[in-house]
Image (cartoon, rainbow, N blue to C red):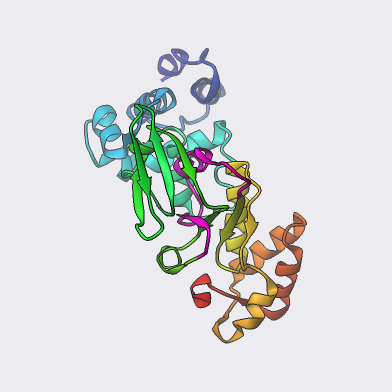
Amino acid sequence: SKILYLKYAKEEGILGDFCRDQLERLYDKKKPAYKRERAKNYIKLLKAVLSNESEIYERELSVTILHDSKLFASSYRKGLCDILRKYGDYDKLILGEEDERNIEAAILEAHNVFANPEYVYFKGESNVTFCDGRKMSTFSDMPLAFSSALLNNISSIDISASKVMTVENLTSFNRIKVDDAFIIFLSGYHTAQKTAFLSRIRSKGDISWLHFGDIDPDGFLILLNLIKKSGIDFAPYRMDTETIRRYKEYTKALEAQDIKKAKKLLGLGLYTEEMEYMLKTKEKLEQEALL
């Protein structure tokens, strides 16, 4: 096993850090963290993922490296993500996210590894210009979805609206109608593909950036995550205490995780009025109630 790790111990970054740590265990006479064959596969996966620059699906990675289309998901996915997370910096990508599956997806996506093709749903009037010079127009009454592969070939998205709005849930995206707005389905904690989509949006005038999500602690953490990832100062849309009061008959009780997240946001000094109100009333509101 030492020979296996020694080969990459002088590498910079995650792979080198991982191998040096494993060597240190062996030199200290500790039990190896991984059996030889498993360690060999983790090193091969790390090399492939860290050097990957084009979109690849998990089953393709699994076949290429492990010679089995399902072995990565069933036996190596979590372990690889644990290694990447330990030695890499993914805090900005997973800010506020607590679901392990979503955390793993965000980490892998940072290296262009996807479980399935990523799609971005949107509706609004725009002129889309592709890198090869081709152009197309989109319309408010014609929702569309662009695949991640197509997104990589977009040069710019010129909109006529004065507002860009991201919407947390799909039902709300399908139902919502806001005048003079270009609307994008966020799907919870948003991905790097959606960040790229946002970065390509252009307008001849000033744009207001809005986010419409659930009025609960997680909804505000999703908003915070969106701001951090995109670098855009999104303002909450109808995510205030007055809206909760107005739709009180549709509120639901806060759960233990909600309380924990609300206290986390209070500790950061963020959205204090909304968090204090929710903790006081023990109520939250799903955005679908507004529609």
Residue in front for this viewpoint, 239 or 57: 239
| Residue 73 in the image, given as x and y percentages of width and height | 32, 43
| Residue 217 in the image, given as x and y percentages of width and height | 62, 65
The range drawn in magenta is 178-207
Horizontally, residue 287 falls left or right of residue 283, namely left
Residue drawn at x 54%, y 22% is 13
Residue drawn at x 75%, y 61% is 266
| Residue 23 in the image, given as x and y percentages of width and height | 51, 21
Residue drawn at x 53%, y 52% is 161
Residue drawn at x 51%, y 15% is 11
Residue in front for this viewpoint, 235 or 123: 123
| Residue 113 in the image, given as x and y percentages of width and height | 38, 36
Residue in front for this viewpoint, 128 or 26: 128
Q: Quadrant of the N terminus?
A: top left
Can I make out residue 118 in this image?
no
Can I make out residue 105 in this image?
yes
Residue in front for this viewpoint, 286 or 77: 286
